Amino acid sequence: MKILLLAGTSEARDLSRALVARGHHVVASLAGATRAPRDLGCETRVGGFGGEQGFRDWLANNPVDLVIDATHPFATNITKRTARVCGDLGVQSLQVRRGPWAPEAGDNWRFIDHPQQAGDVIPNGSRVFLATGRQTLKQFSGLASCYLICRQIDPPEGPFPFENGEFRVGRPPFSVEDEVGLFTDLKIDWLVVKNAGGAMSRSKLDAARRMGMPVLMINRTAPPDGPQVATVDAALEWLDAHY
């Protein structure tokens, strides 16, 4: 069968290889947020579809049996658009959405729903490490009294959007020891993350626990209705049950 895989996560990478090994024709799509993405082991297109109408047109010109949305848990617009368009066109879709993180003993987490609420929690004058990516960086304007350090995978294409901050470039994975050393060197007071879940990027949370550092956790939004699984194995089981 022909499958369109909306990628950008480690689950998408593992799933593409598993699907190809099963003999499926997989076309993976990457938004292009990372300049040197890792090989997905299948036909790959980069750069998005040009909005909702572009996505509709692509599906009309490239019929598929299934669309698997394995994008980042915070790629909210893509996920909503995918569910809406597939529903309108009668194309079966499946969301692969890894489970969120949950605090453990020793964690000091505070939860918010939107980046704009960060200023209501983090004290003035704090040094804040934003492990939230560059796309939502401007939404942290409420932290004008703090010093912000935003980590991203690729070197920045422009200056930091606020006078009170800087970019830090780094490509995961990072060990707990790496993160402890980095946070110590930068004299970080608060860590801010999106609740993306996943084992690979949890090391920063383990480092914060080890250091007794508070974490500001941004909650996910509710996903659209439709079939949803949390793991690659569950996605393959769903496929076996439905095809």
Image (spheres, helix red, strand yellow):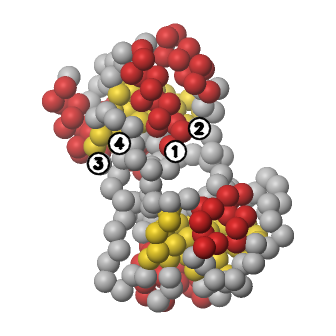
| Pointer 2 or 1: first along the chain | 2
**Would you call the spot at circle 2 few (<14 residues within 10 Å), some (14-19), or many (20 or more)?**
some
The residue carrying mark 1 is 75
Residue matched to label 3: 231
Mark nearer the N terminus (4 vs 3): 4
Which of discs 4 and 1 lies nearer the camera? The answer is: 1
Residue type at numbered disc 2: Ala
| Residue type indicated by callout 1 | Ala
Indicate the position of residue 50 as horizontal and vertical percent values: 64, 26
Q: Are the residues flagged by discs 4 and 3 in contact, CB closer than 8 Å? A: yes
Relative vertical location of residue 196 with respect to residue 225 in this rendering, above or below: below
Q: Residues within 10 Å of mark 1 (few under 14, many from 20)?
A: few
Label 4: which secondary element: strand
Closer to the chain start, of discs 4 and 1, is 1
Query: Could you tell me how far apart the alpha carbons at marks 2 and 3 are, in whole angstroms?
Result: 21 Å
The percent coordinates of residue 185 (x first, y second) are 65, 87
Q: In the rendered structure, are the residues bearing label 2 and label 1 in contact, judged by CB atoms less than 8 Å apart?
A: yes
Q: Nearer the viewer, residue 32 or 143?
A: 143
Tell me, yes or no, if residue 49 can be seen here: yes
Q: How many marks?
A: 4
The secondary structure type at the circle numbered 2 is loop
Residue 17 in sight in this render = no
Looking at this rendering, what residue extends furthest in the top direction?
61
Whether label 1 touches label 3, CB < 8 Å: no
- Structural distance between the alpha carbons of marks 4 and 3: 7 Å
Q: What amino acid is at disc 4?
A: Val
- Front of the two marks 1 and 3: 1
Report the disc number at residue 31. 2
CA gap, disc 2 to disc 1?
Answer: 10 Å
Q: Are marks 4 and 2 in contact (CB under 8 Å)?
A: no
Which label's residue is closer to the chain start, 1 or 3? 1
Kindly identify which residue carries mark 4: 96
